[in-house]
Amino acid sequence: MAHVSDSDDIVAKLLTESFSRMSYTDKLELISKGRPTPQLNLVQKTKRFERHFNIGNYARYNWMTGSTREQKLYCWDCLLFGADSGSWAKDGYSDLGSLSKSAHRHHNASGHLRATIRLKTFGDTRIELQLDEQQRRGVIIHNEKVKRNRGILKRLINCVVYLGKQELPFRGHDESVTSSNKGNYIELLDLVAEYDSDLHTHLATSTVFTGTSLRIQNDLISAVASVMTDSMKEELRKAPFVAVMLDETTDISNVAQMSYVLRYVTEDGIKERFFKYEDVTEDKRAEAIATRLLEFLRESGCIDKVVAQCYDGAAVMASGLNGVQAKVKETIPQALFIHCYAHILNLVLSKGASKIRECKVFFSHLSGLATFFSRSAKRTKLLDDICQHRLPRAAPTRWCFHSRLVCTVAEKTRELREVFEHIVDHHTEFDDETVHCSDGYITLLTSFDFSFWLKTFHAIFSYSDVVFQILQNKGFDMQFCLARVDQLQRQIEQEKGNFDSVYDETQALVGPQRGRGAQGDVRARYRELHCSVIDSLLTQIANRFSDHKKLEFLALLDPQQFGHYCNYFPTAALNSLMESYGGYFDQPRLHTELAVMYDMSDILGKSPAGIHQFLLKKGLSESMKQVYTLSCIILTIPVSTASVERSFSALKRIKSYSRSTTGQVRLSDLALISIEKELLIALKAKDQLHDPAIKFFIQKDRRVDFVFQ
């Protein structure tokens, strides 16, 4: 017999926690300990004496037990296995006057006898063990099935990722079993299945879920895009500030697509992330676009972090009265508007050159030269054979393309003359129009006027091309880009002094200009024209980049001025910062931190990006929090919408003529996979792609098990 203390009342526990609900192991352990036989303070008073419970009753009845908490007697056998809810099984017995009679009656009860038999034979049949084992095997079988299904799903995801990254179409016109071309997605799965027995078996035998339907393709694409979006939103959550960039274009289906790109700074550097396309065909008013933009920022959880907005110069976007930038500022006052600098530079070159008649004639001839070859395969073949370089097409609104054309013609003038002379010499092999145009272009290429402007703009574009490349690189901060624009202005101004060399080189190449008047008069006229072009460009730069004053605070982290700032603190720049972003700073503390920084040899000459990385690497982002915040704001402000423009290039590749029916959600998701492929590769390398994608995928009802038990 076992004895228990009041603090370990097993009987009381059995009254609240049924024995039948215990695991087989716990049941076996409880039975092996034996019935508890505690000393009870069970007393029954009568008129003549008091009855006390005699512990010897436990020996008399080998099934009797008691509870110190309840101060009652119970039947151990019935507590464990009896279905009887009488006094000895559930309620407990406490009448000592009738104890012997009641115990004798219970001992002979059939229910008690069945409970005793079950107690004595417990473990022989092990029903609970069989049930537990069956359940365990069921779980194992289920999890093995889930593992197989998730393995197949990972293969499908890999195929989706591959096609999305490569911007390849998924579907075919005929995806039936007998089709010779079922589309890239199914054909890729069949190819992989040739080397993957599990996938081959799945595709050959599965009748419920093959993973090849349009709905499954869309769900898989959406799942991958959702994982990427969540990753970018996590970056946004950690970023201190955000800038938004928008632009709109029309796709192959004549749908107006708005592209959303956000710029922010992380510990890894500057990020410009594409988030989505949105159909804005129905309403392209400023109010509607601003409403959509603010809704997007709220959904992304970063509306309170926006410090800048960057668009092109269209009135609906850039107007300070009723444009998108004005509507956004009503909700986000600190959202500084930046007119895309690459767009401004493009306007500088186009407007500056088109205002002068001779320049406009020159560029029209130049465009005609490129068009001449693009309209004939035979002409292009001859150009390839002799020049071994094709002429880039000039776009009316993209003057960087004019620049490429100018540079190509300037470098290949001799070869181009050979092409045209070959056509004239072999006139019987070409049509009349080709011969006629070639004869005219020979005259053009040898004319003084064309050669003079070709040299002039070749020199100017050699400077502007460098700035174009800088403005379209997201890694450069605003201060650096503004310095390059100022440098371009000085370089163009210096071209005034190069007139004589340009004129003399042109004269040496094609001979003197033939015309009325003395040579001195002709030279003076060209000098005047040359100066007019330079002055026009300088005026355009001064006027179109005139809003630099609102960015005066950028000078606070100008590395070229740190030595000067040690003696003369840039108070005006600090006031400019407080005017635009005063709510983010403690001005006295910022003044102190800047004064200390200007005197630090470790930071001398470092750009804002270098300062940002230095503070992070040395653990000074909290100690110099004001300077760190300033570096983050300066790095967050965008220079151009080049990333948005690149998203339009992806749009043209993804939604082509043969894929013009692609749905809006699918289009946006595929663009995200293509444009942010570096993020996708990083997630895959860190094993953070497949399981989260499966988690998104199984949120919809599936007829196949994908969840482990």
Image: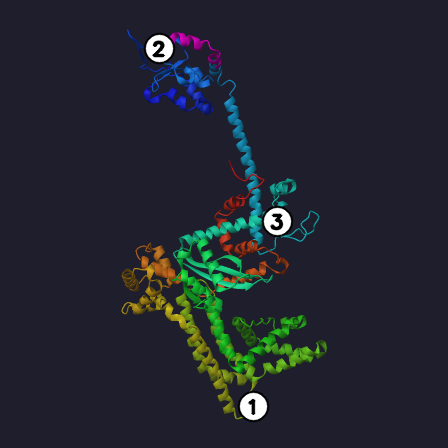
Residue 617 occupies quadrant: bottom left
Check disc 2 and report the residue beneath it. 96
Q: Relative to residue 379, is residue 493 drawn left or right?
A: left
Taking the magenta stretch, the answer to whether it contains residue 216 is no
x%, y% of residue 44?
31, 11
Check disc 3 and report the residue beneath it. 214
Check disc 1 and report the residue beneath it. 515
Quick check: 399 above or below 593? Answer: below
* Range shown magenta: 97-114
Q: Nearer the viewer, mark 3 or mark 1?
A: 3
Can the viewer see residue 124 in this picture? yes
Taking the magenta stretch, the answer to whether it contains residue 100 is yes
Q: Nearer the viewer, mark 2 or mark 3?
A: 2
**Secondary structure at numbered mark 2:** helix
First of labels 2, 3 by sequence position: 2
First of labels 2, 1 by sequence position: 2
How far apart are the alpha carbons under marks 2 and 3? 80 Å
